[in-house]
């Protein structure tokens, strides 16, 4: 019976593995004929122990007493097979096999008295876990030696040779580190050849690892990623220095948070960067930890532990946590029930993160992504953890052209995409990919090659609006541009009548660098209200309901001014600007103050538009005629207009 921290279950396997003659790598074994009844799990365990150079240490366990040994495995799924292998030695070993499935037992402060008693009485003790942190501290402190079990090409090749009875060179399996013990065993089937086993391993790795359906651009060419690309190139140079032995891995600042709105390709960039570094990427998320476990507290913690352990086991690699803001900020856990549930998860995550970024297994980069950086627990971003935030922004015209070239996959290679890139300013990489896909579909269904006009139509389709609706939308967008240009707060990048995400038109601006003050915030809000102000002037106060998104943005900004920045009537911080906007429903004083500011700024925008009505009408007419204007074209029209 097994002695697994008090639990009891049948030992299962009957054929001995770790006999005294099993310490060598079957170098003298006859591999001409397949071994009768070869057990895949057994072959894999034997190969892994041999790959860890454990033969001498196992021999000591057979001949000496009072030894303390730690066996560190790639993931929780390896714990039980290794435990049973040591049980078959039949030496009266006390085995602490911990896979992280019990939050109350599988922790460092449980079992220490027993460990001390066993060792002092001359009994050998073996601890098996994916992380030493869940083994008794007395065992970790007293360990005479350790065995580092890893999933490597050499180990798999040895296991294949043991199973099929024919030695063969190791074959490359991309994403091998994504396979757990049972994933590997499932590829070994009776009667299979080595080639067939490797084919199954590749198929399993492609399914469980990162997706391979789309092509990855080279990082050096991916100019659309701006500062993120510069970070990646610098990291690549540092990593090359580490591989050459010039720097210690801990000197590399490679752990970071990718922050930015959805659709900017943060996950895609993680794949590009991992490919640039030449390391595998283990991509996961907090929600996946729930989906791949029973959902109970212990099982979620075990899943998180297992993910970190798998990354450390297949180092060098990158571990990517998407939607990291799904881990709540502990300061926000005011409800007792949610706090008691989430606090252990967050605490365990931080502990494992510390181990991954500063542990004794170098070569693990930890990256995380969020659409909401303000929701990320500050403890995650403190020095020594994910202490660098890489901000993602919408690509500029050159970046858009680069994305389009990649998505076109060689089509229209002789066509200048610069004009189309200007039209597409303000589109996210996901929107650009969708537009190219639509253009290809149209050409394919028409049974003809893709044309430039297909891309234009997919990127900027002509809406079937009536003349009055078209004019009102043009007036609205022109109002935004006129107020923005007059105040000089931001740079107008483009204005068009081809919207996205439900908008009827767009005025895209680029924020100028500088410190935010009350005047700059109010000027930006004034420009936000410029579209509505234009409708007030042109249609004698008859505004459409389509300015709701403008009002939402303006209200949020002014609410934040009062409740978040200390630039209003009081100094109290009541939350970020979104939390402040939510307070408007219950705080009448705040609501009155915000309404007063919005009314004042709306009046200011109306005054600007009224004074520059000639420019407004000229710009609106140009929009109706051409549907799309670049920032330079907008400025030229306004400069030549009568007023």
Image (spheres, rainbow, N blue to C red):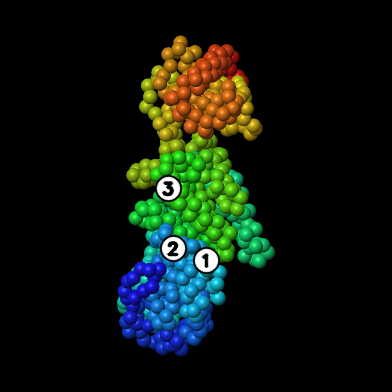
Q: Quadrant of residue 573?
A: top right
Q: Earlier in the sequence, mark 3 or mark 2?
A: 2
Q: How far is disc 1 from disc 2 in space, using C-alphas?
A: 11 Å
Residue on which disc 3 sits: 340
Residue nearer the viewer, 208 or 348: 348
Label pair 1/2, CB-CB below 8 angstroms: no
Q: For the residue labelled by badge 1, is the local secondary structure a helix, a strand or a loop? A: helix
Residue nearer the viewer, 579 or 635: 579
Residue nearer the viewer, 374 or 333: 333
Residue on which disc 1 sits: 137
Residue 61 locus on image (x, y percent) = 49, 82
> At x 64% / y 32%, what residue is drawn?
515
Residue on which disc 2 sits: 106
Q: Earlier in the sequence, mark 3 or mark 1?
A: 1
Q: Is residue 110 visible?
A: yes
Residue 418, placed above or below residue 291: above
């Amino acid at each position: 019976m097994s002695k697994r921290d008090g639990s009891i279950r049948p030992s299962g396997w009957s054929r001995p593995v770790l006999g005294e003659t099993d310490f060598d790598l079957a170098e003298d074994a006859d591999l001409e004929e397949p071994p009768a009844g070869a057990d895949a799990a057994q072959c894999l365990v034997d190969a892994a122990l041999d790959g860890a150079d454990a033969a001498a240490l196992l021999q000591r366990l057979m001949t000496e007493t009072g030894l303390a040994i730690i066996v560190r495995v790639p993931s929780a799924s390896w714990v039980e097979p290794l435990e049973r292998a040591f049980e078959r030695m039949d030496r009266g070993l006390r085995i602490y096999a911990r896979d992280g499935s019990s939050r109350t037992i599988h922790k460092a402060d449980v079992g220490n008295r027993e460990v001390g008693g066993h060792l002092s009485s001359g009994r050998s003790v073996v601890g098996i876990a994916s992380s030493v942190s869940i083994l008794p501290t007395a065992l970790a402190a007293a360990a005479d030696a350790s065995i580092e079990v890893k999933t490597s090409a050499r180990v798999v090749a040895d296991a294949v040779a043991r199973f099929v009875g024919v030695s063969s060179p190791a074959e490359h399996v991309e994403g091998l580190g994504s396979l757990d013990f049972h994933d590997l065993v499932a590829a070994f089937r009776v009667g299979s050849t080595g080639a067939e086993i490797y084919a199954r391993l590749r198929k399993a790795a492609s399914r469980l690892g990162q997706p391979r359906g789309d092509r990855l651009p080279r990082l050096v060419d991916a100019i659309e990623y701006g500062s993120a690309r510069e970070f990646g190139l610098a990291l690549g140079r540092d990593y090359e220095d580490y591989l050459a032995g010039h720097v210690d891995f801990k000197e590399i600042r490679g752990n970071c948070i990718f922050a930015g709105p959805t659709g900017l390709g943060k996950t895609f960039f993680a794949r590009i960067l991992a490919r640039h570094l030449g390391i595998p990427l283990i991509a996961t998320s907090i929600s996946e930890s729930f989906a791949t476990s029973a959902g109970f507290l212990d099982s979620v913690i075990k899943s998180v532990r297992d993910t970190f352990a798998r990354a450390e086991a297949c180092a060098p690699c990158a571990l990517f946590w998407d939607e990291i803001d799904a881990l709540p900020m502990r300061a926000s856990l005011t409800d007792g029930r949610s706090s008691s549930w989430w606090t252990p998860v967050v605490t365990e995550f931080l502990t494992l993160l510390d181990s991954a970024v500063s542990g004794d297994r170098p070569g693990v980069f930890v990256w995380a992504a969020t659409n909401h950086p303000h929701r990320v627990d500050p403890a995650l971003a403190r020095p020594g953890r994910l202490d660098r935030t890489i901000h993602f922004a919408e690509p500029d015209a050159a970046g858009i052209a680069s994305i389009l070239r990649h998505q076109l996959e060689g089509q229209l290679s002789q066509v200048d995409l610069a004009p189309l890139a200007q039209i597409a300013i303000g589109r996210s990489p996901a929107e650009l990919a969708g537009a190219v896909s639509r253009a290809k579909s149209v050409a394919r269904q028409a049974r003809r090659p893709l044309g430039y006009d297909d891309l234009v139509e997919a990127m900027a389709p002509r809406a079937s609006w009536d003349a009055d609706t078209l004019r009102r939308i043009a007036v609205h967008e022109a109002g935004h541009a006129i107020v923005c240009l007059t105040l000089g707060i931001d740079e107008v990048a483009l204005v068009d009548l081809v919207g996205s995400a439900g908008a009827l038109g767009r005025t895209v601006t680029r924020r100028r660098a500088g410190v935010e003050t009350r005047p700059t915030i109010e000027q930006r809000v004034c420009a936000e209200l410029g579209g509505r102000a234009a409708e007030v002037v042109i249609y004698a106060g008859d505004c459409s309901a389509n300015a709701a998104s403008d009002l939402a943005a303006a209200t949020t900004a002014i609410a934040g001014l009062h409740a978040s920045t200390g630039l209003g009537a009081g100094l109290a911080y009541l939350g970020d600007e979104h939390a402040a906007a939510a307070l408007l429903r219950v705080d009448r004083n705040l609501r009155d103050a915000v309404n007063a500011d919005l009314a004042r700024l709306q009046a200011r925008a109306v005054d600007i538009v009224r004074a520059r009505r000639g420019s407004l009408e000229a710009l609106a007419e140009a929009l109706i005629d051409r549907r799309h204007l670049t920032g330079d074209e907008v400025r030229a029209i306004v400069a030549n207009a009568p007023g």
